[in-house]
Amino acid sequence: LMLKKRIYIAPLLIGVFGASVFELLGKIAFHRPRPNIMPVYAEKLFSFPSGHAALTFFFYGFLVYLIFKYTKRWHVRVHSMFWATALTLAVGLSRVYLGVHYVSDVWAGYLLGGLWLIISITFAEFFLSFRRNNSSTKDYQNAPMPRRMITGTVLLLLIFIIVYSVNGARFTQQKILV
């Protein structure tokens, strides 16, 4: 079934690439060190945000989006939502438990993954609406963009920028005081 849905490959790659790049930029911008406890696994890069949390949230969220789009049975939808949430939380908790991230790093990773999830779903819906409405022409300018998706993407981007800035400013103040 999903092999015929190649239209979702580009949004999936956009989300994975975008989340990875923003995660790396966040680590470079904030230089937040890892927790001082002895970690089970030593990481080399900085702590904020958690890339594992971001990519897990994005990937499982995108899978749930596809399941909701192509499955009408409610129990399949509920189970997919439950397991995606459970796995995403387990990955975040494991990063804190292993001593390689603070809780705020994991939450910022979830927020970053959510941002790229909404951006990817927006692209997927755009490509689908373009294909439905303009199957014979290649005019992307006339394809309708879902307004709710644009509004949600802009709001999530603003929230993400605020959280990034507040956490970075707070950490910078702590570094200056020490």
Image (cartoon, rainbow, N blue to C red):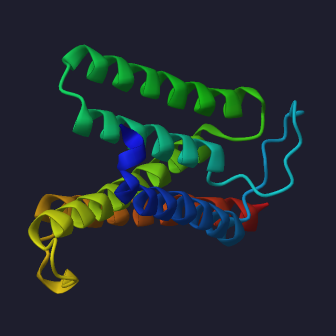
- Does residue 174 appear to the left or right of 54 in the view shown? right
Task: Judge by depth and name the residue closer to the eye, 36 or 14.
Answer: 14
Question: What is the tally of numbered marks visible in this picture?
Answer: 0
Point 60% across, 67% down: residue: 21
Up-down relation of residue 102 to residue 133 (above or below): above
Whether residue 103 is visible, yes or no, is yes
Whether residue 50 is visible, yes or no, is no
Quarter where residue 159 is shown: bottom left
Task: Judge by depth and name the residue closer to the eye, 88 or 36.
Answer: 88
Point 60% across, 33% down: residue: 92
Point 12% across, 65% down: residue: 147
Point 33% across, 40% down: residue: 66
Task: Judge by depth and name the residue closer to the eye, 125 or 177.
Answer: 125
Up-down relation of residue 121 to residue 99 (above or below): below
- Does residue 135 appear to the left or right of 87 in the view shown? left
Task: Judge by depth and name the residue closer to the eye, 67 or 5.
Answer: 5
- Does residue 172 appear to the left or right of 61 in the view shown? right
Up-down relation of residue 142 to residue 8 (above or below): below
Farthest top residue in view = 75
Residue 63: percent from left, percent from top: 41, 38
Quarter where residue 25 is shown: bottom right
Residue 113: percent from left, percent from top: 48, 50
The quadrant of the image that shows the N terminus is: top left
Quarter where residue 177 is shown: bottom right
